Structures are given as structure tokens and as C-alpha cells.
Image (cartoon, helix red, strand yellow):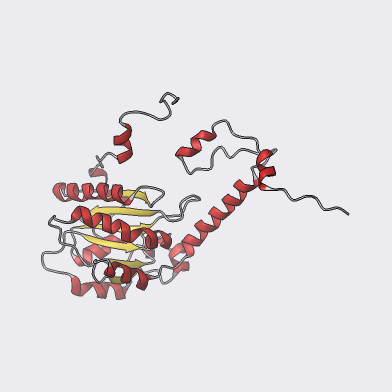
Amino acid sequence: MTQSPQLTHVQEETQITANPWQALRAFTDARIALGRSGVSQPTSAQLAFQLAHAQARDAVHLALDFPALQAELQAAGFGASLRLHSAAADRHQYLQRPDLGRRLDEASRDTLTPYRQEGGYDLALVLADGLSALALKQNALPFLQALHDKLSGETWKLAPLCLVAQGRVAVADEVAQRLGARAVVILVGERPGLSSPDSLGLYFTQAPKVGLTDERRNCISNVRPAGMSYEEAAYRLHYLLSEGRRRHCSGVDLKDETASQGQEALGNSNFLLAPPTA
């Protein structure tokens, strides 16, 4: 009995029917124009999808090494940070009870009490693992360094840096309210996509307090090397912080009027309408 020959990568490629709009893949990580082999998608595309699905699933369940992150932040000059915990006792409860991830547990409330100052703070920065601890691990420090460059030389009284385990976006409101901060930004791991298991989200709220809903926040999403750069995200957030402090508002009352670096480079052109280059 003879064995069937193994299909090599070169043989597989020759059996794939290419897609006519494959050139658009240069502009997106979305799974488009994969081609086909017969009536099925190519083996390499199927394996890549399974890998991306596994990476997204792992990102949700990966535990963040908080002591290591605290040490990195302190070594980078951000001082000692406060370690807090949401009311969700563990990851299992966190995923099933979003409401618990939006509030602090009793021990964390007590931890914050001595740090409240008369006159309050201009800004509180909160870091939460969210739905991707990987995002915080990889992106929090370089983004904070970029933001620090924007804030340096300006008069911002910053609250102690706070790290929240099993935290969701709204937990920052309680942290800021208990510290007496007039504004808060939370860096949180976003829900992983099939091409972005490490996406960091930034949420800014002016006059934070428990019970606020999402229309009171401004969001900057997909902060990571393969998405929005740290420099551009810091530029956009700095604008929101400055305008929010000046206008005493955020969310739907505060529009992001910055232009991305890419838009400035392209002007009013549209790559889909631009004539082909020689």
C-alpha cells in the first residue's frame, strides 16, 4: 500500500485561486481576499485563524503580573503605585458579573482613604487588566512615557498611580471620586479581536463619580504597535485632557478635533480614489 505524498507549501500555493482585490490587504488586518482552494479556504488561512482565536482566548484568561508591572513603573520614574481590586473576587466571577468589575472591593476603598488630599488632584491615572492583561503588560509603560512627555512642563497635580485587578472601565470613576480627582483616565485591556489580542483602550472622564454612563467618557482605542501609535494616542489624549479641564466636560460634550498624523500626511486624498502609480 503506497502512502499519498505530503503537500508542500509550494504545492499548496499553486492550488490556491487568488482573489482579485487582494491588494487591499495592505490596508487592513481583516481577513479579506484569502483566496480559495476548490470550495474551501486555504490551509494556511485556516491555521492562522485558529492561532488568532487561541491567542484571543488566552488574552482574556491570562493573569497580569502586577508586582512586575509596579516594579517597571517605579523604575521608569512613575513612583510607587497603589494596587487595588474590584469587587469581582476572581476571573470567573469577573467574566460573569460585569457590574462587580465596575466597583472596588472594601479593602481597596480603605486603601485609597489616606491618599485623599484637601484641594484634590487634577488627574488620576488608573490601570486595569480588563479583558486583556497582555495589552496592559505590553503597552501601558510606553504609552505613559509618551503621555508624560506631553504633560511635562504643565501644571497637573497627579494622584498616585492606581492598578486595579479584575477592573472594568467604570471602576476608574470610584477610584477618582475617592481620591478627589477632577478627571480620570483609565488604561484598560480591550476585548481581544482575532487580529488584536493586545489592544489597549484609554477612557477619559471629567468630573468622575460612581454611576456615570459611557456617554460621559471619551475613548481612544487600539493603542498598540500594530494599531494607533503611543505618540498619536498621547497627542489625542493630551488634547482631550486640556480641553476637558478648560471646558469642564467630557464625553459627548467634548469632541476630539485632532487630526491623525496619517490624515495630515494624506491631506484630503483617498487611497481608494487615487490614480494608480506608475
Work out which quarter of the rendered image holds the N terminus and state it: bottom right
State the image quarter where residue 98 is shown. Answer: bottom left
The residue positioned 64% from the left and 38% from the top of the image is 36
Measured as percent of width and height from the top left, residue 159 is found at 20, 65
Measured as percent of width and height from the top left, residue 3 is found at 82, 53
Q: Residue furthest front?
A: 278
Q: Residue furthest left?
A: 119
The residue positioned 27% from the left and 58% from the top of the image is 145
Work out which quarter of the rendered image holds the C terminus and state it: top left
Q: Is residue 249 above or below residue 188?
A: above
In this view, the residue in front, 265 or 10, is 10
The residue positioned 50% from the left and 38% from the top of the image is 25
| Whether residue 230 can be seen here | yes
Measured as percent of width and height from the top left, residue 223 is found at 36, 51
Measured as percent of width and height from the top left, residue 55 is found at 52, 58
Q: How many marks?
A: 0
Q: Is residue 10 above or below residue 62?
A: above
Q: Is residue 167 above or below residue 237?
A: below
Horizontal relation, residue 166 to residue 242: left or right? right
In this view, the residue in front, 278 or 193, is 278
In this view, the residue in front, 221 or 266, is 266
The residue positioned 54% from the left and 32% from the top of the image is 21
| Whether residue 104 can be seen here | no
